[in-house]
Amino acid sequence: MALISLRQLLDHAAEHGYGLPAFNVNNMEQIKAIMEAASAVDAPVILQGSAGARAYAGEPFLRHLVLAAIDMYPHIPVCMHQDHGASPAVCIRSIQSGFSSVMMDGSLLEDMKTPASYAYNVETTRKVVDMAHACGVSVEGELGCLGSLETGRAGEEDGHGAAGELEHSMLLTDPDEAADFVRQTQVDALAIAIGTSHGAYKFTRKPTGQVLRIDRVKAIHQRIPTIHLVMHGSSSVPEDWAQMINDYGGAIGQTYGVPVEEIVEGIRHGVRKVNIDTDLRIASYGAMRKFMVEDRKNFDPRKLYKAAQTAMTAICRARYEAFGAAGQASKLKPMRLEDMSLAYARGELDPIVR
Ligand SMILES: O=C(COP(=O)(O)O)[C@@H](O)[C@H](O)[C@H](O)COP(=O)(O)O
């Protein structure tokens, strides 16, 4: 198979009524875990690299690891997506580096801390769309600031996330504004703020409809039915793995993530991409702590990494199955990015706004 654009992947997901987890990747073990799970259940894959991942692994390593995945699992279409681009320059460098999809996060200024004006968001996102679509590359925008509706704060993140306490209205994407944003920018996918936040500490109790606004997903979807909605901060923070970390000497506080059934409800109403990073961190970390305590004689780190990989594969597989992505990879025939760019130029991929 081959590299696939986010747009083609999510159009297929919309047509067949499923959603796709977009897992953050930083190293070989994470990528292999995801690919093993996808291969086992025949699911298409989105691998996404953040600024933190680029700082950790370096752009050449990230790029070659994804290319290795495409080589090793030729039957699985892979979208290589850049997560949270801080500026058009970041997005352009990713396109140059071979990404088939980029996110321009114009909800924040380039410092990735200060909430941006609507006009700034439209202008920077539109700039990226014009350049990316000319290359057949997809663009995800973001409208509204991610953060908790309980505390008004963004989650802890490696280098990005709004600083300070935000007003309630800034933490919820407005459906009318979303329609206007899509009309003006022509993005392929839109990350929306509905009360989710990055990291392990999302909710202080099992979230109700007051703090996890799936009703807002439905309202936005009605206005922009062909735009693929993206839920960031959508780890479910599995209790058993958090407990595993604590059982083996860790100190994870009481916390709740986004329940899988709420994500599935979102998928019924236009959510197609579901960002997940923390769940793989927690599972791999729990497995490594357990392994190190239980096998004190071991000195081969590969066994430790393998334990982490096995734990991550189980989470990925469960998400592919729950979101309905299992069995879909073999139905896809990736279009070349050149052909995607022609389709954009002919207006065939223009959004519908109601
Ligand atoms: O939504 C995301 C993850 O959600 P999660 O914390 O797993 O609920 C991603 O888009 C984040 O951007 C990602 O976790 C970034 O990680 P860093 O590499 O910047 O730490």
Image (cartoon, helix red, strand yellow):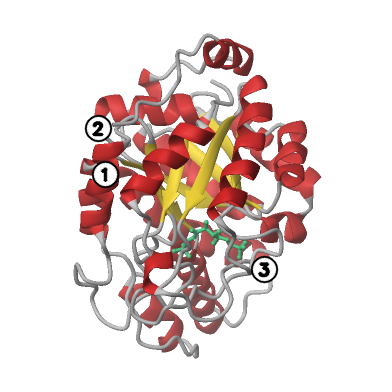
Q: Amino acid at mark 1?
A: Ile
Ligand 1 under 8 Å from disc 3 Cβ: yes
Name the residue at 34% across, 61% down.
194
On-image quarter of the C terminus: top left
Using the numbered discs, state the Cα–Cα distance from disc 1 to disc 2 in whole angstroms.
8 Å
Using the numbered discs, state the Cα–Cα distance from disc 3 to disc 2 in whole angstroms.
34 Å
Indicate left or right for 30 with 234 as reference: right
Whichever of labels 1 and 2 marks the residue nearer the N terminus, that label is 2
Crowdedness near tag 3: few (<14), some (14–19) or many (≥20) residues, C-alpha within 10 Å: few
Whichever of labels 1 and 3 marks the residue nearer the N terminus, that label is 3
Crowdedness near tag 1: few (<14), some (14–19) or many (≥20) residues, C-alpha within 10 Å: many
Q: Where is residue 101, by image quadrant?
A: top right
Counting from the top left corner in percent of width and height, residue 80 is at 60, 37
Q: Amino acid at mark 2?
A: Gly
Residue denoted by label 2: 17
Counting from the top left corner in percent of width and height, residue 338 is at 63, 13
Residue denoted by label 1: 267
Counting from the top left corner in percent of width and height, residue 209 is at 19, 67
Given the current orientation, which residue lies at the most extreme front position? 119
Q: Which residue is more in the foreground, 183 or 206?
A: 183
Q: Which residue is more in the foreground, 216 or 82?
A: 216
> From the viewer's perspective, is the residue at label 3 or at label 2 nearer?
3
CB contact under 8 Å: marks 1 and 3: no
Ligand 1 under 8 Å from disc 1 Cβ: no
